[in-house]
Image: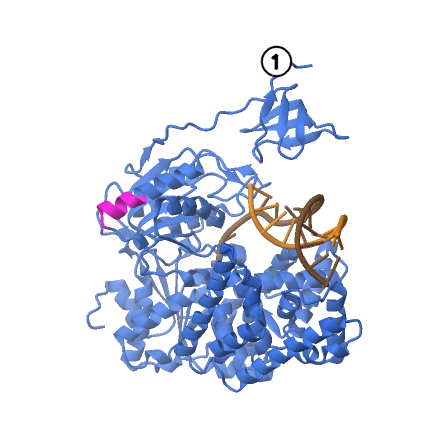
Chain colours: A blue, B brown, C orange
Amino acid sequence: MGGVSLNEPQREAVEYTGGHLLVLAGAGSGKTRVLACRTAHLVATGFVEPWRILAMTFTNKAAAEMSRRVASLVPAGSGRIRMGTFHSVCAWILRREASRGWWAEDFSIYDSDDQKALLRRVIRDLGEDGRVTPSQASSWISMCKNNLTGPEEATDSAGTPWEKLMARIYISYQAALRASVAFDFDDLLTVSLDLVRQDIDIGGRYSRMFDAVLVDEYQDTNLAQRDLLLALCGPDTQVCAVGDDDQSIYGWRGARVENILRFPEDFPGAKIVRLEQNYRSTSSILRAASSLVSHNSGRHGKTLWSARPGGDDVLVQAAGSASEEAAWTLAEATRLHESRGLPWSEIAILYRTNAQSREFETAALGMNIPYQVIGSLRFYEREEIKDLVAWLRLVANPADRVSLERVINKPPRGLGERGKEAFFEYAASSGRDLVACLCSASRIEGLSRKAGASLEHLGGVLSEAARASSSGSPASEIVDRIVADLGFLERFRGAGPEEEARLENVEEFRKTALEHDTAHPSAGLPGFLQGISLLTSSDDFEQGADRLVLMTLHCAKGLEFSVVFIAGVEEGLLPFVRPGETAPADLEEERRLMYVGMTRARDLLYLTHVPWRQRHGTRAGGPSRFIAEAAEAFAPVRSEESPSVEPVAPRTVYRRGNLVHHPRYGRGLVLHAVRRGPEWQLTVDFGFDEPKVLLTGYVPIPVIREKGSPGDQ
DNA sequence: ACGAAATCTTTTTTT
DNA sequence: AAGATTTCGT
C-alpha cells in the first residue's frame, strides 16, 4: 500500500491471498493496522468486492476505526464492507431472516438487567422463589448457551435436583423470551447459528455471501462464534483471524482460547504469520510485561521485542490507603500533564473492579482534573433512560412484556399488584399483543375505572407512535412524541440536582437519537434501538477528549496510552479472589489481564498498591505476586516506599472484657477475641438471646472501655 | 395504592 | 457498605 510502511511479517499478512490466514499478533504489534491494510488491500487489488467482505471486531468502536482506516486507504467502496461485532452481525442476520423464524423483524434485545427481571418473574411463576436468585439462573443459562446446550438437552442431562431446577427455569425462560419476541445477548449468537445450520437454504446463502471474512480478537471468541464463523464460510471463502493467546481475558464468559489453537484444523491449509515486533512500548515496559506472562504455562509462546530503548519506565508505588493511592496517582498524573505537556487523554488509570473508580473520581473532582469513567454506570443503564427505552421498545415491539412491566405503573397510575396481574392474564388469554390489550383495558375485569382509563391512554399513545414509526418517522420524532404524549418529564419536575441531571440525560438521549437519524436516515426507530442495545462499554470512550481516562483492565483491551497507572495491584484484587474463596478462579487469566494492562503503556507504566483496602467487608492484602513476577527478569523496576506520613491505621487490640460499641447493635461486652489474619473475630454479648460473632473490618467497632479500667463492674 | 422503613442480598470482569 | 426488595403503616 502506498505510503504505509509495513515490516516483513506485516506485509505478508496484508498481502497473502492464498487461503486462510491466522495472524498471531503480540501486544502492540500493529494488528489493527494490519487488519485495516489487509482489508484495503483486498479491495484495492480488486481481489474481492467490498460488499463481499465481512469484518468482525470486538467492539463497535473498533469496527468504526477500521472503517475509517480503510476509507483513508481506499476511498472508494469501503462503505459497503459489512462490519460490526459478532453480536451486531447476528442481529443483522436475525432481522433479515425474521420471516423464516418465529420472531418479528423488530425483536427486542434484552440486556442483563432485562434478563434478570424476566428471570425473576419466571422463577416466581414456577413457585421457586427463594431457592434461586435471578443472577444464579442467568449465569447458569448463559453457560449453557455458551456451550450450545439448548433447554431440552439441558433437561436431559440434568442430574442433580439443582440442575433439574435450573433446566426447568431455562425452559420457561426461553418460552418467556419468545412470548416477548425478544433475544438475550447469547441468543443472538445461538439462534443465528441454529438458523444458518438448520435451514440449508439460508446457510447456503450466507456461506456464499462473503469471499473474505476477517475476525479480530479471535482468542476471545466462544464456541458459538467459532461455529458461526465456520457456518458463514463456503468453500471459496478466505478467513483471516487475528489474535493473541496471551491476551485472552474473557474465559469467564465462555471464550475459548482453544479456538485460536485449533484454527489450522478448522480452516485447513491456513497460513500462520507471527507479528513479534512491538511498536508501542519501551523495551523495559515490554520486558516487565513479558516476564510476567512467561509465568503462564500452556502458551503459544512468542518472543515480543521492542526497538524502542527505555530504562526507567516501570515504577512501583506503595501507598498508605486507597485514598492516598488516588491522591498520589493524580498528583503524579498532573505532574506529567504539566511537565511533559501530555494531554489528559494520554493518561489512563486502570483497575480490576469498577468500584475502584470512586476514589479516583473523588480525588479528580477535588483537584479539578477533567476525567472520563468508562463503563461503570453506563449511560443507557440509567433509570430514566431505561424507562424511556422501554417505551420505545414497546412502540417497535408491542409484545415486549419486560418493557411494559418496567414502566406500566411508572409514574403510579393506580395499578397495584393485582391490577397488573389482571392485565397480563387478560393479555395472555386474549392472544393479542400487549399494546392492543392496553387499548381495550377498560374492558378488563378487576381493574379500577381509573386504572383502565389510564392504560387505554397509554395504549393510544403507543399505537399512534407505532403507526408513525412504521410509516417511516425518524427515531428522534418518536422519542419527542413519547416524551411529550406521556408527560415523561413530569416525574422529574422537582428542582433537585438529581432531577436536573435526569432531565439532562433525557435531553442527551434526544440528541443521540437525532444524530442517529442523520447518520442512518432510513434506520428509523427499530434501527436506533438495535444500535443502542448492542453498544459496548468501550464505545463511550472519547479518544480525542482531553480528559483523564478511568476504566477497568478489561475495557482497556485494544487501546493504548502514553502513561498507564495500574491501581490496586494487590493479592486478592489482582489476581482477583472471590470473597469466601481462597484462590483465584483462574490465575493465568488474571495474569493475562495484568499483561494486557501493562502493554497498554507506551512510555511510562506505574503499578500501585496499598496494604489494605475496604472491599465490601473483606480486605485484600499485600503487593500482588504479579509485581515480583514482572520485576524478576531485570532490574529497572524501582520500588519506592510510600512518602505518606500517615502510617497504616493503628490496630485496635481487643480483649475479653472490653466494652465495645457497634453502630448497629450498640454497646456490648466482648466474651471472646481471636485474631484472624489482620482482623479480629469477636464474640460479643449485646444483651440479645445469643451472643453475636462479628468480624472486624466491616464497620468500626471502637473499644469504649478497657477491661479493668475505672468504672468497670 | 403508595411511600417509608426494615430487611435482605450481594459483592469481577461484559456482549 | 450499598442497593434492591419486602413489609408495614397510612
Q: Chain of mark 1?
A: A
A446 inside magenta stretch: no
Q: Is residue A59 something one can see in this rendering?
A: yes
Element on which disc 1 rests: loop
The outermost residue toward the right is A445
Asked which quadrant contains residue A2, the reply is: bottom left
> Which is the main secondary structure of the residues drawn in magenta?
helix
A336 inside magenta stretch: yes
Position of residue A87 measured from the top left corner of the image (x, y, whole percent): 50, 69
The front one of A303 and A228 is A228
The stretch in magenta equals A333-341
- The quadrant of the picture occupied by the C terminus of chain A is top right
Whether A509 is drawn above or below A654: the answer is: below
- The quadrant of the picture occupied by the N terminus of chain A is bottom left
Whether A336 is drawn above or below A135: the answer is: above
The front one of B15 and A505 is A505
Position of residue A232 measured from the top left corner of the image (x, y, whole percent): 48, 76
Position of residue B1 measured from the top left corner of the image (x, y, whole percent): 72, 63
- Whether residue A168 sits left or right of residue A253 in the image: it is right
The outermost residue toward the left is A3
Determine the residue positioned at 27% across, 63% down: A9
Q: Find disc 1 in the rendering and name its residue.
A: A709
Q: Is residue A296 something one can see in this rendering?
A: no
At label 1, which amino acid type do we have?
Ser
Position of residue A123 measured from the top left corner of the image (x, y, whole percent): 71, 60
Determine the residue positioned at 25% across, 51% down: A342
